[in-house]
Amino acid sequence: MKDQFPRVVIAGRPNVGKSSLFNWIIGKRIAIVDPTAGVTRDRLVQRIDEQGHLFELVDTGGMGFDDPDGLTRHIDAQIEAGLTEAAVVLFVVDIRSGLTGVDIEVAERVRRTGSPVLLVANKADDMKLESHATEFAALGFGPPIVVSVEQNRNRDVLIDEILSHLPEHNELLEIEKPVMKLAIVGRRNVGKSTFINALAQEDRVITSPVAGTTRDSIDVLFKVDGLSLLAIDTPGLRRAKSRKTDLDFYSTHRAQRSIRRADVVLLFFDAAEPIGKVDKQLAELVVEESKPVLLVVNKWDLYASGVKTAEWVEYLRKTFRTMPWAPIEFVTATSGKNVKTVVNTAQKLFRQSLCRVTTSRLNTIVREAITANQPPADRRGRPVRIYYATQVESGPPTIVLSTSDPDSVSQSYRRYLLGVLRQHTPFREVPIRLFVRGRDPSGRAKESSSQKKQQE
């Protein structure tokens, strides 16, 4: 629905446990939790249903932190954007560290929002620490709600306080599930976040020339033609030998998880840069997960004058031979050129992946393929018999082939069958999973000990 969800915004100085609190409240590990100051840069937003009350929980970066990559101004703008929309502010302090000068500065800033402020004293992992909470009364927000994310203490108390300060529940409000999830992946600085902002039509995530600006996987809801869609902005991946810190590990893990979550993957490239090892590794991961993928060449305005699209298409086809079916689009995310086209193509791929083909139609296709090109011989020198084919799943389309000897069906013949299936089914531009199985004397499909799976 278009109605605005009330927003509960988490704020505070670095390292008070804001991201841990965010994960704790929503019950999922979404935000990166790390002792390194300044890990969270963008706003993370999750919609929550607590006791029938719907709201959005927002995690923000640490206030009073000078980002070493020169992104302080951008991070601060994201914090301010969050606070401006806050129905309630959760002002988080560290009970172990006690009251600090930065806490006092943060207090002044959240007070200016005019929104209700709940003071949350985190890290009370030892009950003896609760007596230390009294010093935070000097901030002027009343006694703090003392919690421990580590010990799972007082979550219910905090939730009750949040709900008591939210606007009256809107019965018409509902959490609308996106009809399609898009994962935007690629190496660093290919313009993924700029593309996300073009979709959202706002500066939803930080963009900068600094490599590795995005650290978390960030879910951004947007609408196209009245449909609710979800874009997942992922951290740019680095080569394995260049991953030196925990943040690199977390970022890589979240990018991989985002691919698994997605209905369609947009694999981004920089038009001015050659394809590298990271690009190939990402492509391999997409193929392994059997995800529909759209190859997106970004920053085309900077490069289009010297190279034709046909040359880049040929370059991509030669490089990614395992996905010749994947469509290719050229965009300029900074201006929004062709962004809608990319979304439309992704929707088409999603629809293809959900199609189902009847068993009778599949068997007609397979019989014609066998007539045109006989299967290889089995270990006794007899042609392998293919009894039937049936689609057992969609998204991705999964087809089971029942044969007399699955181990004798070569990989080249499987590729041949996949090519025929792709030509005569709706699955023209999406991966198809093909399982080749034997059957027992009763005629039922039976997996052999050397069951092979061909993915395309």
Image (cartoon, grey):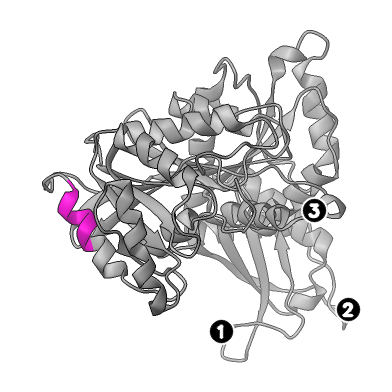
Residue 151: percent from left, percent from top: 43, 76
Q: Which quadrant would the C terminus be assigned to in this image?
A: bottom right
Q: Residue furthest top?
A: 305
- Please give left or right for residue 276 compared with residue 290 in the image: right
**Could you tell me the amino acid type at mark 1?**
Arg
Amino acid identity at mark 2: Gly
User: Looking at the image, is 84 positioned above or below residue 310?
Assistant: below
Q: Which segment is the magenta one?
A: 160-166
Q: Which mark is residue 381?
A: 2
- Asked whether residue 78 is drawn in magenta, I would say no
Q: How far apart, in angstroms, are the residues tagged by discs 3 and 1?
A: 49 Å
Q: Nearer the viewer, residue 119 or 159?
A: 119
Secondary structure type for disc 1: loop
Residue, disc 1: 444
Q: Nearer the viewer, residue 26 or 220?
A: 26
Number of the front mark, 3 or 2: 3
Indicate which disc, 3 or 2, sits on the residue closer to the N terminus. Answer: 3
Q: Which residue is mark 3?
A: 243
- Would you identify the image quadrant in which residue 380 lies? bottom right
Disc 2 residue crowd, few under 14, some 14–19, many 20+, Cα 10 Å: few
Q: Which mark sits nearer the N-terminus, 3 or 1?
A: 3
Left or right of 48, for residue 238: right
